Amino acid sequence: MAYKTDIEIAREAKKKPIQEIGAKLGIPSDDLLPFGHDKAKVSAEFIAAQRNKEDGKLILVTAINPTPAGEGKTTTTVGLGDGLNAIGKKAAICIREASLGPCFGMKGGAAGGGYAQVVPMEDMNLHFTGDFHAITSAHNLLSAMIDNHIYWGNELEIDQRRVVWRRVLDMNDRALRDIVTSLGGVSNGFPRQAGFDITVASEVMAILCLALDIDDLQKRLGDIIVAYRRDRTPVYCRDIKADGAMTVLLQQAMQPNIVQTLENNPAFVHGGPFANIAHGCNSVVATTTALKLADYVVTEAGFGADLGAEKFLNIKCRKAGIAPSVVVLVATVRAMKMNGGVAKADLGAENVDAVKNGCPNLGRHIENLKSFGVPVVVAINHFVTDTDAEVQAVKDFVASQGSEAILSKHWEFGSEGSKDLATRVAQIADADMASFAPIYPDEMPLFEKVETIAKRIYRADEVLADKKIRDQLKQWEEQGYGNLPVCMAKTQYSFSTDPNLRGAPVGHSVPVREVRLSAGAGFIVVICGEIMTMPGLPRIPSAEAICINDDGVIDGLF
Amino acid sequence: MAYKTDIEIAREAKKKPIQEIGAKLGIPSDDLLPFGHDKAKVSAEFIAAQRNKEDGKLILVTAINPTPAGEGKTTTTVGLGDGLNAIGKKAAICIREASLGPCFGMKGGAAGGGYAQVVPMEDMNLHFTGDFHAITSAHNLLSAMIDNHIYWGNELEIDQRRVVWRRVLDMNDRALRDIVTSLGGVSNGFPRQAGFDITVASEVMAILCLALDIDDLQKRLGDIIVAYRRDRTPVYCRDIKADGAMTVLLQQAMQPNIVQTLENNPAFVHGGPFANIAHGCNSVVATTTALKLADYVVTEAGFGADLGAEKFLNIKCRKAGIAPSVVVLVATVRAMKMNGGVAKADLGAENVDAVKNGCPNLGRHIENLKSFGVPVVVAINHFVTDTDAEVQAVKDFVASQGSEAILSKHWEFGSEGSKDLATRVAQIADADMASFAPIYPDEMPLFEKVETIAKRIYRADEVLADKKIRDQLKQWEEQGYGNLPVCMAKTQYSFSTDPNLRGAPVGHSVPVREVRLSAGAGFIVVICGEIMTMPGLPRIPSAEAICINDDGVIDGLF
């Protein structure tokens, strides 16, 4: 049987005007700022007016550690949202925006797949509503104003060797990782080492995703530490007087975007920090707005539950005062097989033993998630090649862990395929079984927070960090930043910091390479192992195949 | 008498939904891609369908050399367009988009002033419909793909010292003018000298503004020369295989934007190359589309007539096959006084002699414009402090040059103030008096083209250029680029290359510092004197005062 490709299905979508989609959530047309006929931003005034309404139930979708086989976290988020709507619930989904850079490198976007997709797919993988461009502009305005301040006399006495604010582009460009700027003589300033990160790694991105409203946004932008003086005292964005103009640049980007699923259900798509180098969740504004407008809100956190869900629960929930009623952990038979040692080329053949061998990775995520006090349901995202015996093996394993696994066929059938999952998830959410708490308190010392995550989530024996790093953490505690959560930057492919260590490893060490204070976002970034904040392009970038074809349609983007 | 500020007037605008504005030109709602309720892009399909319609009359607005007093070229363009509509003509205006970078430096945007403005002003000075962000992305994708090609083995044998494609940001950031990239070791590539220009200086900007349609856009992008080999043969964008993906990134940006004047008349705002470092006109697509939809199209070219109008007539008209029926040359009494030696602080006092002394600058522009075979009308953009005697002095001078000067009070009264100007301009346009021709033929050698402009427009005695530069021009002629027009990059403040030489200088020399081949845009850039392609921020950037005020409104942007 031949299946249609994602893009073929997306192109056949019968989209409704975005005003009709907004109306499903009670948003009047005047409060929707349209971007074309199928995208809109929700006005800040409307959002503010919902403040006293009761919240719906929050459902977090997370996954096992990703494998090249693909797990389908976004697909499941979309499928579950459509399923909830299909069984008569008022539901909305909240996902992240795609980053432009990687689209021209190796991967397509993050709009789901099969019959569980969000549209318009092309726009979402290109400029969308311009949010990331606004973040790039705001970030780089601050960068320019710092060097400009130094150029005109450096009244703030910035130590030019200790400028910690880099520049950003939404592009995979390894040549910009490490650069020397201001060459060429007097009129170009003072040469110094500098560099670019990808926009999704910007602290401005994290701030936009964590800010409660525009005032909170400006306050947090002002709190950004951009440099240090020779005496090590910090220089803030506020000192450079860039926070006002940055807020103006971000005003529109702060308004969450609404689009639709293939089944014409509302989808918020807003913010897009990576989960390996940032906190990896869509914006607090989008999630809290959706909670006011829908009875069930399905949202996802990036990569595996060791990264995205940990940060969703310890950072986003803590900061936004929200909590999930249930967590859906996505797994696939194929990914279990890969965790069980099968090569990608051999995934087509039935192999129940390999499935069983791969299950411990799933088991550990279940255990970890439960330690936050939330009920966990496993969603088996069905591939058409999965055999009944393989599916049963996963179900049996999950049952042995005291949880429940539900097969879901949203990829193949849309909401028809996800009704079972939706029904069970709604039941659990309605039962109010969760007693959520982050796994470390605010007042725990910073290094202990890192150890808590490393030992309780990654199951490492120890955290390795130079004295310099420990001293840095202590210094920040003395400066009043000790109550911040930690944002782990680590490979997504393993519980450990070694991407090749699949399954459920124990006895490993977590080496901390660097720590960065994101005083505006409100967390400490802890960089473990070799994680890049500016990716490169592969030998044959996907950009080479991207074009407008003879029918005037975009090819190669997916 | 107290006058309202531009921004106060703009905030009181009674905007109509953009669909109503489009309807005035016969554009159906379905062919308008909305960006909010007051901005839209016109669909490519609709534009293509107008192809066989007859063109309206094209009216070019240009100006004397700019002074700190301000001339009001955009204001006059808007006022004339509103005036034409007020006297019962079907008219549209075509202007350029504002660049973000300079808005945070010294100047506000370019949306007119007083009662002759285009709205929404804030959006137009910020992200607008994202066109410049798309250009930045497309430009930098090519940059990343060039370094990536070298990184992965350099199959095209690019000489790393001869990569001529830089990077761009829409930001005034002098620290990025001259940089060294790819430092930090093997995984970051091969260190080399590089740098950033401001986005408006990008060849991609020029290409977007000169391309006839999306196919022409891709062809021109492919033609960009990005580097040379050791044997000096060129490497094209097409060789890097970036042209397809760049076209996809620019697809939406190619569609012209439509907004409205304070009097709810249609305004196309599209493209924004600077007139001192690029060709300085709005897009060919916007102008030719407007000509199909309106009976009169008023458009402007950047800075003084020696730069913007020269390039409009020699480059844009030549490439697009269009010609103005009449040219409106904007002058102000204040600017005449400054040209006549009065300091800015003393402009308030009547000084007829200074006005007379400043008139030769105006006279030379009239003479130059007439040499293109087009009728010229001088519009005196009225300031409330101008005295009757001063105005009369300008009128008398213009009459002595065989032309006509008309006082226009659009700034103070909107179309009520510009009806005289509109009536006379329409009469001249209808009389079909123009017999337009560029001042040099395609087949003239490149250096002679430069000499022709320098001698006939700038009135210089000679062009100074090293043998190296002359040899370079000859080489391009041998490679088949000899038929291209030349795009002069020169200070806007003087006919000469010395910004302090006001009035109508003679006997000066034009030193050519550098020549660049823009094979995609289709011209040779000739850089004369000290012109920067990446500006810096001033000591106190205007960004410091930009913020959202307590009423939720943007302050400081203008």
Image: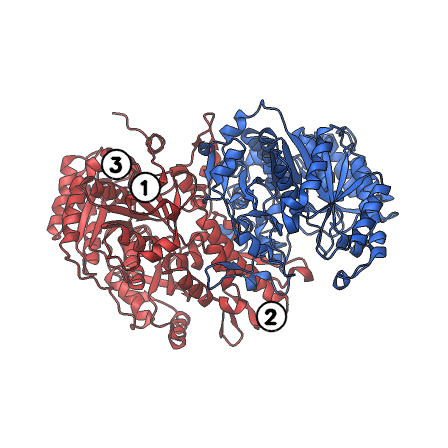
Chain colours: A red, B blue
From the viewer's perspective, is B336 left or right of B320? right
Residue receiving disc 2? A154
Which corner quadrant of the image does residue A126 belong to?
Answer: top left
In the rendered image, residue B203, in percent from the top left (x then y), is placed at: 62, 41
Disc count in the image? 3
From the image, tell me which residue sits under label 1. A21
* Residue assigned mark 3: A411
The chain ID associated with circle 3 is: A
Q: Residues within 10 Å of mark 3 (few under 14, many from 20)?
A: many
Marks 2 and 3, Cα distance to the nearest angstrom? 58 Å
Which amino acid lies under the numbered mark 1 shown in the image of this protein?
Ile
Question: Is B20 located above or below residue A374 in the figure?
Answer: above
Q: Position of residue A242 (x, y in %)?
A: 52, 63
Amino acid beneath label 2: Asn
Residue drawn at x 74%, y 28% as measured from the top left: B431
Q: Nearer the viewer, mark 1 or mark 3?
A: 1
Q: Secondary structure at mark 1?
A: helix
Q: Are marks 2 and 3 in contact (CB under 8 Å)?
A: no
Q: CA distance from mark 1 to mark 3?
A: 22 Å
Judging from the image, mark 1 belongs to the subunit labelled A
Amino acid marked by disc 3: Trp
Tell me whether marks 1 and 3 sit on the same chain: yes
Q: SS for tag 3? A: helix
Q: Nearer the viewer, residue A228 or B198?
A: B198
- The earlier-in-sequence mark between 2 and 3 is 2
Do the dots labelled 1 and 2 sit on one chain? yes
Circle nearer the N terminus (1, 3):
1
